[in-house]
Image (tube, rainbow, N blue to C red):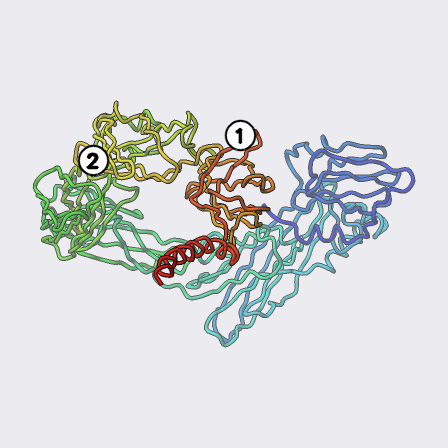
Amino acid sequence: MRKAVLIVAILFISPMPLVGAEGETIHLWSDQAPGPVLLWDDTGNLTTVNPDQPLDLHLPEGNWTLVRLIDGIPQDNALNFNANTNATTFLNQTIEAPLEVTGSAHLNILGPIAQSTQLNATFSSSISIPNTLGHPDLDDAHLGVIHQITHEFGGDSNLFLQWIANNTNLNCCAYDKVDMIGDANVVAHVDNQTWGWTSQANLTGQGDGRSTRLIWVPITGALSDHTDLRISLPSPHEIRYSPQSEHISGLPDDFVIDRGSIGVTGNVTIALGTNSAPVAAFHAENRELPWLPFGQHSTIESDCTDSSIVEPANRFILRDGNSTLIDAQSDNITIDSMFLNLEPSTWLNLTLECTDPQGLMSNHSMDVYIDGVQPTGTIQMQYLHPDDTSPVNVTIGESSISIPSGAVLSGAVQAGDDSAPPVDIQWSSNKSSGWLQLGIGNHAWNDIFIQGEHTNGQHLSIEDRHQAKPLTVYSLQLELIDAADNTMVQTWDVTVSDRNDPKPRPALSVDGNYYGELNYPIEGLSTIDVSLEESWDDIDAIEQLTWEVELNGNSLNIGDSWTDVSSFTLPDLPTGRHVLVVNATDSSGNTGSHQMMFIVEPPIGSFFEITDVSIMGVASPGEPGALDVTIENAGQGASQFRLCYLSDCTDPLTATEATVDGPGLMTHRISVSEWASGDVIIQIEFPDNTTVEHRTELTIESEMTPLMWILLALPPLIGLLAFWQLKRQPEDEET
């Protein structure tokens, strides 16, 4: 599509007043963006319109005109309005034959084209412009040429035509970056539909000292840029290069520039040069020349290149000695040895002739070989599983291979062929998407093989994962391909045997609810059930597994079949941490183990045991003192109590709770107002007035004072004195 860069710009040169909303207004709107349009009032003043947003304008009262633009040309079906108007229908109308600028231009370069030499050329052009668009150098171009003739020339069209003749430039070209010069003969015209002019001129240019000649074609947005420019060159010259080549078509020495499609201002640069012969070359699709396979067709493609903008003509000639097998004017030929009745191991001659539009020719010739011998290879394969100490060799001649899951399979091949180029090696498999191993001549690889996605796992429902699954079978293929595309293929089925452990997954429930941090079992109150429903083996059905269950290192005798172990109840367990181990063995001898630790919490309530009672200081009957009482609580839950010795009691106390790690331990002191003789007995009193009595091994005894010792010793002394006195009386009597 041709652009009207400058035309649109000119149309918007006129002052564009801002639309206000003061006073009475006319509302102009549309349901969609209008695209390129012009909007002016009855004085011809333009108002800015955003082409990319739906119309929503409040215009001053008056007569308004809305005109659509196509390639910058105002169309003749204008919308005239002086009241609120919805322009949607107007904008949606299809313009079957839009108004456009027509014409052509021709630069005929006569020559000579050489360094530091004057160039001669002729230039001619014609252009026809719809009357809806005026001359861009005059005011109010958007109101059309008739308006301009009336207001600028008093309605005298001859004055307008003379003005065009005097003010029209050729707008042609530059040669070696300098404008070509010459006097132009311009003849203008205007009628009821169009206006425009024709130009004729003899031009000269001056070549500079560089080796390459350049032509510059200016793109300024002028009306003439709507027309194509044809450029003709004298022999043997041609166009060599242009950065804007996508806008150039035709022959190397007679080409056309589509100026209207460029859309930006600047210069179209064209490098000229002397014509030279093309460079001839060819290649084979999926073949390595000169080797062609016997029994398969091969396509040979031309790679002729030329400095011209036109591709050269191609001619292929295939000969067997003095006999011509193919002679074709084509960009490619197909060589089919069977169709041509050729024998294997035959040499042929292939020639390509490339001819440019000016008649210069070059050729490329090659002897090609019809190869009918397949490549050969020495193959070795072995596998090694991580649990094994030495690799296992694979018998190559068999079509099926069995390897344990998780084993690393290794492959190596040494390939050869009767032709000179090395053989391409390609290993392929469906073990994973895009699995491919490539090499040339000699190649080795290794990869791990495991069971495929169809095996049992957590991704399946419980019912599905309990079903038997088939072993994974992969395909493995080796292709040896020589330069002529002869192929040797060998395939294997790789069966992955079961070497994976079963997956026991015990799940605990406490009183019918899932075991967890918020639902630990309680000693003496909770039933602990074990479910193995979520367990699986990758291959075997769940019923094919054998089971062993251990609790805290001791075997549980619950059976070994799935019926026995799928769901069972643990025996009553004390407070603490316990370890459950479940082992499962599949039919292949693989054993999987799962160990889990779970917690049994202390019982609910107060389970007190006095473990130690200590007397503070010296305890004597009648004297004050204190007792330190150490208590273990084997229960959990908030509980209160008092400790008493005789009538002396503590304030209400809160018991320390037991945990899974052991009983709650606490020590409290009883203040004793007066010790009583005898055994020390401690009572635990609870809020419900129940008591627990604890008899300690402690005893309170009286303490002996000096007077008590004197009184204790006095009777024996008196007795001794009396006995001594009685013993002395007989002696005195004798004396």
Left or right of residue 665: residue 44: right
Q: Residue 716: horizontal and vertical position, in percent?
A: 42, 54
Q: Secondary structure at mark 1?
A: loop
Q: Residue 128: horizontal and vertical position, in percent?
A: 66, 47
Q: Is residue 248 above or below residue 659?
A: below
Contact? badges 2 and 1 (CB < 8 Å): no
Identify the disc placed on residue 690.
1
Quarter residue 531 falls in: top left
Along the line of sight, which residue is nearer the eye, 270 or 643? Answer: 643
Which quadrant does the C terminus fall into? bottom left
**Label 2 Cα neighbours within 10 Å, binned few <14 / some 14-19 / many ≥20:** some
Q: Amino acid at mark 2?
A: Val
Q: Secondary structure at mark 2?
A: strand
Left or right of residue 412: residue 562: right
Q: Residue 425: horizontal and vertical position, in percent?
A: 18, 50
Q: Amino acid at mark 1?
A: Thr
Along the line of sight, which residue is nearer the eye, 716 or 9? Answer: 716
Identify the disc placed on residue 562.
none
Seen at 77% across and 35% down, the residue is 29
Identify the disc placed on residue 473.
2
Mark-to-mark CA distance, 2 and 1: 76 Å
